[in-house]
Image: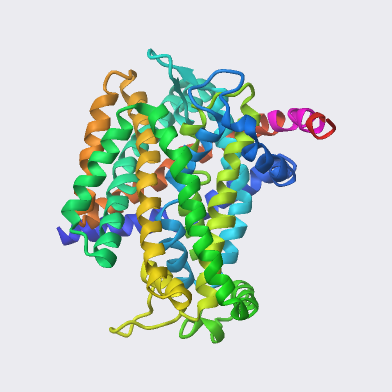
Amino acid sequence: METIGSIIKAIDDFVWGPAMLVLLVGTGILLTVRTRFLSWRNLGYAIKSTLSKEARKKGDGEGDISPFSALTTALAATIGTGNIVGVATAMVSGGPGALVWMWISACFGLTSKFSECMLAIKYREVNEMGEMSGGPMYVMKKRLGGKGGAILGWLFALFAVIASFGIGNLTQGNSIADALHNTFSVPTAVTGVIVTLLVLFIVVGGIKSISKVSSVVVPLMAIFYMIGGIIVILINFRNVPAGLAMIFRMAFSVKAVGGGLCGSIVASMMNAMRYGVARGVFSNEAGMGSAAITAAAARTDHHVRQAYINMTGTFWDTIVVCTITGLCIASSGCLGMLDAAGDPVKGSALTIAAFQSALGPIGGWIVTVGIALFAFSTILGWEYHGEKAWEYLFGTHAYNMVYRIAFSAVAFVGCTTALDIVWNFSDIANALMAVPNLICMIILSKEIADDMIAFQSEIKAKKNR
């Protein structure tokens, strides 16, 4: 069993290695340049559209849920433990400069997120129930065509289903159970039963039920965590300038450097780049194709308009939430602390220590509740991703209820059992989802650019009103 585990871990390390990170960020760079940096130039328009009253209404066009609900359901899957645990891990393993590389990868990830969502909406279908079904697999089948498109679409759907049970369910359930057990001494079995029943109750209603919960839970949980983080930063404000200086210095230092607020941590630019890009992509999922599945359910009269709204998911996830976590850690003086065993404190323990440095025990409660809410929302978002991929594999919605029940049951297993092999295997599937999706976006990059440029006239007309 140990041999199998070590083999799977080695494969996991390889697929999430430099080649994958270069492909993910490289595709983002290619698309950003080819679309004339319109994702950057129109970010203000996209954010304004997201926060508008129109986005909360079903509006014109076809679709199952409002534009805002499509975004929050996608965000439910991406704003997760990576925003709390992932940032802390990156800043320990890659140094505080990893935060800068998370920002850089997110800037190019904006275009990747836009592109995959735009294509998914453009080539979506209506199933037998009259519901929208879309995502990279439908784009590959309808737009690429032939055996190649069919194979890529099938592989993407298969990897998406596997990832939904693992990275989107088992690992999240385990994070919830661990956080509540360590902070509030809640038995993992009790957490497992509650999480399973809640998930089943919500997902049985399909996308409309999931989106109703997500449109309330996601904004509230993000605001709750962000307010706590901003208070920590304000209390430690005297350390913020030094913390920012340390972040930028260690992000671009060719030689390994340390000292200052980072305690015992020493890191170089290459280390910061490696861990920053990896954790950034893992957090916002730009280029993975998962958010595109939810985007396809949006009610909209233009695929580019909705793609801009969904594109902001990367901004909210990485530029906003991850930055708050990073600044809390950098200004707290906790980075580089050693635990009882003499190892650097990392993961959720580091973020908890950073919050506690300013707020005492309440800080630990905020992070714990944040982890629980973020992880639970991730389970809901990934259920929809996996369900639509499942529907694609079977060619019918008839077995969707089987998936919903099985998915809910797996949540209990995640809360009560540590399955490292399954986690690594699902992590591999998550990475492999990106490969066919990125290939598809590169092939269709001209179409993406043409549609994006053509929509500029509408944006200009709206600005002139």
Viewer-closest of 66 and 342: 66
Viewer-closest of 287 and 49: 49
Q: Quadrant of the C terminus?
A: top right
Q: Residue at 34% of width from left, 81% of height from top?
A: 343
Q: How many marks?
A: 0
Residue range (magenta): 451-460
Helix, strand or loop: magenta stretch: helix
Q: Is residue 161 left or right of residue 360?
A: left
Residue 219 higher or lower than 60, as above or below? below
Furthest residue to the right? 464
Q: Is residue 174 visible?
A: yes
Q: Position of residue 344 (x, y in %)?
A: 38, 79
Q: Is residue 457 magenta?
A: yes
Q: Position of residue 427 (x, y in %)?
A: 35, 51
Q: Position of residue 327 (x, y in %)?
A: 56, 69
Q: Position of residue 423 (x, y in %)?
A: 28, 53
Q: Is residue 269 visible?
A: no
Q: Is residue 97 magenta?
A: no
Q: Is residue 15 left or right of residue 72?
A: left
Residue 364 higher or lower than 106, as above or below? below
Q: Quadrant of the N terminus?
A: bottom left
Q: Is residue 127 left or right of residue 230?
A: left
